[in-house]
Amino acid sequence: MAEKAFLAVDMGASSGRHLVGLFDGERLKLEEIYRFENGPVEVAGRLHWDLLGLWSQVRQGLRAAGARFGDQVASVGVDTWGVDFGLLGRGDVLLGNPYNYRDSQTNGMLAKAFSIVPREEIFRHTGLQFMQLNSLYQLLAMKLADSPLLEAAETLLMVPDLFHWMLTGVKCNESTEASTSQFYNPITGDWATELLGKFGLPTGILGRIEQPGTNLGPLRENLADESGLSGTSVVLPGSHDTASAVMAVPAAARPGPKKGPGLICAKPPPGRSGKLNLVPFSAHWCYISLGTWALMGIESPRPVINDQVLKLNFTNEGGVAGTIRLLKNITGLWLVQECRRIWNLAGRNWDWEDLNKLSAAAKPLVSFINPDSQDLMAPNDMPEAIRQFCRRTGQPVPTDEGAVLRCALDSLAMKFRQVLGMCEELAGGRIETIHIVGGGTKNRQLCQATADACGRRVVAGPVEATAIGNVMMQAVSAGDVASVAEAREVIRRSFDVDQYEPENTAAWDDAYGRFMEML
């Protein structure tokens, strides 16, 4: 086939990029054509996303793609982080900038929610892990504060849905993003309206749910004219960035056994037999989508909603092709990103390689933090917050920058070990390989530490997994790739990966007890 171009707008919590995937029917090449910064914006003590500024960046990237590839670009799709949303009022008027998930409005909101609807009942409806940043608690916070925005709202669109609406004029909710809200039911594949009703939250603002691969139609006429992308359509990828990243995991499929390891017990859909179903899935590997957040889990063909998943606080998020990402959110390289920001504000001007050298020179396995501590979610001074955590828990306090970084990275590797055990508990067998995808694969020290802490082989790459998954979903929609399994074969042929074997595992085994005591 003639080489075809697909455009991915991949937007993370700290940066965004436009990448074009060039597919010749056998291999995929990726070319970055535009990059921009992103991050929360503080206004009057509240944290927002600069939605209109981001939209301006999206349009500039479209123009760059048009200038470089023109009519060769078959389609474009947008992926972003989860949980955050914007509201449209009458006449599709945008009602303010979306709140950032780290905003303080949801502090204490979990307890308030559980006083209205019990935790177990919320989980029964949604199968989602409990995090105060989830969309449900953002909406509840707005309701309890008598928000005029919520009162005026006619449409709720998650962040990538907002961009797809801006691109096409079509309003819909993509399923993988909707699944991060904690008011989506993964068993029915629809909104959990009964749950929202118990909270007194509006349900009429929720739109139709569409699946990855849906073609929304052409770009708005003015966008097509200004960008030179007159023949380009808009196709929904897995618009939650982790859904696209997991699609790009270069794992080979392996048939699951008929019984024993590799089977999950899941509740049957409504109207089916009351017996638990044995669900085969690829139990020999798990994934970590590593960036600002680290999303670690396994891929399942259907939701798993039972007491064990609730106890472990795992989540059932939607994946591509009807799969479920059974995973846990872990604070990821946000810890390092924030340290770098604070040090550079003080005049250091360090890049990522400088940080790698500092951490590599520091003594390992001295002190640990809980990466998911509330104190580390959005501190004003991350290095000092890490020191205070160590001081409060009676550990040696890291005195220099390298020691602070080493504490953060070692703690992440130990957290991965803890969650690996949970994944194996759910899988009913040993996981042999940990696939790390995303920008965090550039941190070779953390990749090796993960292999050492977990005692497992780590396969790292591809780096731009989210954009690759976005592009390949568009290729599937176009009929150029037959399935997700075939897409993964293309990815294995097209991109190199790095492999890390466990080393010095005894030292990590000895230190793991200290880490768990600290937790």
Image: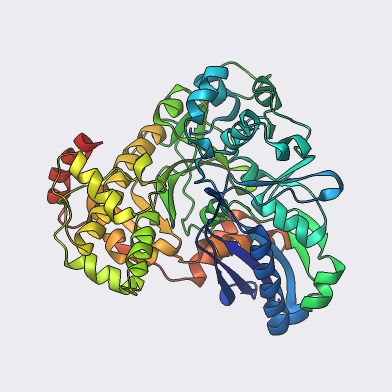
* Image coords of residue 383 (percent x, y): 29, 56
Residue name at image x 23 percent, y 53 percent: 407
Residue name at image x 18 percent, y 48 percent: 367
Q: Is residue 2 visible?
A: no
Q: Is residue 93 visible?
A: yes
**Image color mode:** rainbow
Compared with 315, 115 (above or below) is above
Residue name at image x 35 percent, y 65 percent: 340
Residue name at image x 22 percent, y 68 percent: 358
* Image coords of residue 151 (percent x, y): 75, 34
In-image side of 222 versus 135 (left or right): right
User: Considering depth in this image, is 493 or 31 the residue closer to the camera?
Assistant: 31
Compared with 248, 60 (above or below) is below
The quadrant of the picture occupied by the N terminus is bottom right
* Image coords of residue 137 (percent x, y): 57, 33
* Image coords of residue 404 (percent x, y): 23, 57
Specify the quadrant of the image occupied by residue 32.
bottom right
In-image side of 210 versus 251 (left or right): right
- Kindly give the residue lying farthest to the bottom in the view shown: 68
Compared with 251, 99 (above or below) is above
